[in-house]
Amino acid sequence: MLKFIIPLLLFIILAVFLALGLNLNPSEIPSPFINKPAPNFSAPKLQAPEQKLTPADLKGKVWLFNVWASWCVSCRAEHPILNQLAQQQAVVIVGLNYKDDPNDAQKWLDTLGNPYNVSIMDQDGRIGIDYGVYGVPETFVIDKKGLIRYKHTGPVTAEDVQQIFLPLIAKLQTEP
């Protein structure tokens, strides 16, 4: 009897773990940066490379930090959503052009529209590494104090904007 119960118990335990795993969202990769200060950088602006941007320039503002590239297929999929979000003027959107040719990036924005208040260049990928970027696109929500409050891995969808980003942005806008 015991030789039937042990395999049955092992099967039940395995089935429970499998069921729990199936309920996880693969786009929700945990980030050690949540509620921590956004890593510092000083990066040239895509449209004015002689000028630099730092997170200190954005203190006191809630902002999205969207990692994108002209070579990224998923970035193209999320781009219309970012353009719509930019039209709402609900938040400052900063682009991090990741491991890209600046000319290709500028052509891409000229063709598809530019949702970014400013886009900076990260040609060697160091800023992306500091932010723990797994791949593009990724989007961070950063509060007025410069703390990362949310990380979204993968393309942003209209549902994400309505269900996650806009409510979080509205909440963070009310914080001191």
Image (cartoon, grey):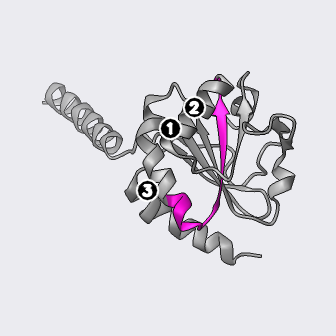
Q: CA distance from mark 3 to mark 1?
A: 24 Å
Residue 160's label in the rendered image is 3
Residue bounds of the magenta highlight: 85-100
Vertical placement of 119 versus 165: above or below? above
Which residue is drawn at the image coordinates 69% and 32% (left, top)? Answer: 128
Please provide percent x and percent y for residue 99. Answer: 65, 23
Closer to the camera: disc 3 or disc 1?
Answer: 1
Q: Is residue 34 above or below residue 26?
A: below
What residue sits right under mark 1 in the picture?
A: 111
For the point 20% across and 28% down, the residue is: 7
Residue 72: tell me if it is visible: yes
Quadrant placement of the N terminus:
top left
Out of 103 and 118, give the one closest to the viewer. 103
SS assignment at label 2: helix
User: In the rendered view, would you say 18 is above or below 162?
Assistant: above
Q: Give whichever of discs 2 and 3 has the lower sequence position.
A: 2
Q: Kindly check if marks 1 and 2 are in contact, taking CB atoms under 8 A apart as contact.
A: yes
Residue at image location 52% in from the left, 66% down from the top: 166
Q: Looking at the picture, which amino acid does disc 2 mark?
A: Lys
Q: Which residue is mark 2?
A: 107
Number of other residues with Cα within 10 Å of mark 1, as a class: few under 14, some 14 to 19, many 20 or more: few
Residue 110 position by quadrant:
top right
Q: Nearer the viewer, mark 2 or mark 3?
A: 2
* Amino acid type at mark 3: Asp
When asked about the image quadrant of residue 98, the answer is top right
Which residue sits at x=44%, y=52%? 81
- Of mark 3 and mark 1, the one earlier in the sequence is 1
